[in-house]
Amino acid sequence: MMQHESLAALEARWPANHRAKIRPLEAALEALDHGQRVFVGSGAAVPQALVRALAERADHLHDLEVVHILTLGSDPTTDPRFDRRVRHANFFIGPNAREAVQQGRADYTPVFLSEIPDLFKTGAVPLDVALIQVSPPDRHGFVSYGVAVDIVKSATEASRRVIAEVNPRMPRTHGDSFLHLDQIDTVVFNDEPVAELEPPTLDPVSLRIGKYVASLIEDGATLQMGIGKIPDATLANLGDKRDLGIHTEMFSDGVLPLIEAGVITNARKTFNRGKLVTSFVMGSRQLYDFVHDNPMVEMRPSQYTNDPFLIARHHNMVAINSALEVDLTGQVCADSIGHRFYSGIGGQVDFIRGAARSPGGKPIIALPSTAKGGTTSRISVALSDGAGVVTTRGDVHYVVTEHGVAYLHGKSIRHRAMALIAIAHPTFRRELFEGAKTRGYLEGDQILITDRQGAYPLELEETVTLRDGRSLLLRPIRSTDEELLKALFYRQSDESLYYRFFSTRKYLPRKHLQSLAHIDYNHAMAILAVENPGPREEPVGVARYFRERHGGLAEFAILVDDRWHNQGVGTALLTKLVAVARAHGVEGFKAEILADNAHMFDLLEGMGLERTTRVEAGVAHVELLFPRAPAATSGGDPSG
């Protein structure tokens, strides 16, 4: 635990040549004048005592402009009684300023977080005074910006006057996080806990989203995440990963268990290897104790952490950002609810674009599928009236909800609409589907099938190794797999198609194609085998069953790419299909197979299932019965 000295001890060891800078709190802001622009430190490093003193001083001033991004805690100067005296200028809107912005009593400036420092440096936003909170100085006279460097460092360097609240409880952080006492004009002492942020309570929706996001993260990836339920839920699902790294604008307590478990090591980062790089932290006292004097953590200004070109230097960079609404073309609104500004652009676009240009990078937008207690869909046909686009449809790659993952990059509007409808809440899918048709996003004969649960069954995904050592991903089919099925069909020989469809068809009618891709997981399942999982995946084979409403048997069929015969693909697919069917209460499979289809009968023979075969007119009517689950034994100690 971080130990902090008393104010008396701090003052006693204060460098003699800087004692003249010390002021009592009530006198610290006497030099503040009418019409000045005042910067206030960020996040958990907001100078709480100075902000309270500013509220006292504001009664004697006019036309102060207070500039900042997100700040924790209450801010009395946002009270309506200061309307003619103090006006807040927000680059990112926090809860303490949201009402003032939405009522028109405060301003919001939409700008990329990476570009804010340059506004100060160039004088585009000149600063008269900077109010900051820092750690006590070291023996060389350097204080640390502590838990927030972000835009604070550039604002401090650009301000004509710097007033620092020195707090012995402020962690001393490493990196580009230092300021010399020579650069500070006025010092006040304050012994007060650094502002903390309560961790969010993870609910089933956020945990499900986190599970889908985690499925996209590979060993050795470098992560950027924001704050809130979804980032924490994602981190909670990463326990089986190895050698993850962090390059982010901020992090919170969720990373601590992964660092302790050896999951986050930063050992495989291709840039700033071995270092956890961030510009600010917000969380608990435990988090602040962790970053204190920890050389593993490097605090850097926003123009560094959020530079898309530096972000792109990390291989396998995964950027995880949230949104308020996404329309069916892929436009992302993240800073407003309709006309009402809610937060800000922040670093979303910086990291989305940086990750997109990273070798193996993955830019992710994650959000719950509904809002307002489930009464509103966050996936919309069109953005709400007044809603602004933060991340453009050209920048979006992955969109994740609790119902699955949609990959949009390089996809047409038709494919985007279907992918996003598939991860919307089932209650709203029909409405979105009809809206997409009305706008011409979808063809008139497009079909939509959705089940009650509406979630892609991620837990059924499985990686298998074939006889030649190659790996394939076996996964449930998605409604967006029409193009993959089409590609698989047109690669097959006439013989293979004849054995599968009982005809020498030359093309796959759209109606038939849709029936193959769009299934209700409650009554059917199709398992697709793919090579190179992800945006460039290639179909290798597919096995499916359809369960009739009544009866214990399900019809099944299988097709394996000609180029992958005799590698065990069919066995892997059918084994997986049997396991899924049994878990859903299916008692066995049935199928009609051409009697001379030797490959299929060899496959069935190798499955070792009880089989009955009846041949009529060259067609074999086959039934496969699954082993019955053993009955539970009675007796014994139920407590184990």
Image (cartoon, rainbow, N blue to C red):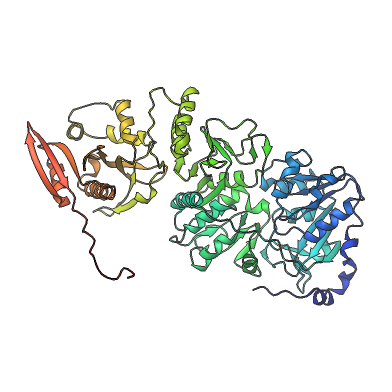
Q: Quadrant of the C terminus?
A: bottom left
Q: Nearer the viewer, residue 184 or 456?
A: 456
Q: Nearer the viewer, residue 370 or 375?
A: 375
Residue 517 vertical position relative to residue 629 in the rendered view, above or below: above
At which x and y percent is residue 447?
Answer: 38, 28
At which x and y percent is residue 83?
Answer: 84, 43
Q: Quadrant of the N terminus?
A: bottom right
Residue 426 vertical position relative to residue 31 in the rendered view, above or below: above
Residue 289 shown left or right of residue 468 in the figure? right
Indicate the quadrant where residue 106 lies: top right
At which x and y percent is residue 154?
Answer: 75, 53
Asked whether residue 99 appears in the rendered view, the answer is yes
At which x and y percent is residue 313?
Answer: 55, 52
Which residue occupies the extreme front position in the image?
A: 635
Q: How many marks?
A: 0
**What residue is drawn where x is 63% and y is 60%?**
283
Asked whether residue 411 appears in the rendered view, the answer is no
**What residue is drawn where x is 12% and y is 41%?**
598
Indicate the quadrant where residue 521 lies: top left
Q: Nearer the viewer, residue 206 or 343?
A: 206
Residue 104 shown left or right of residue 519 in the figure? right
Residue 251 shown left or right of residue 552 in the figure? right
Q: Nearer the viewer, residue 384 or 453?
A: 453
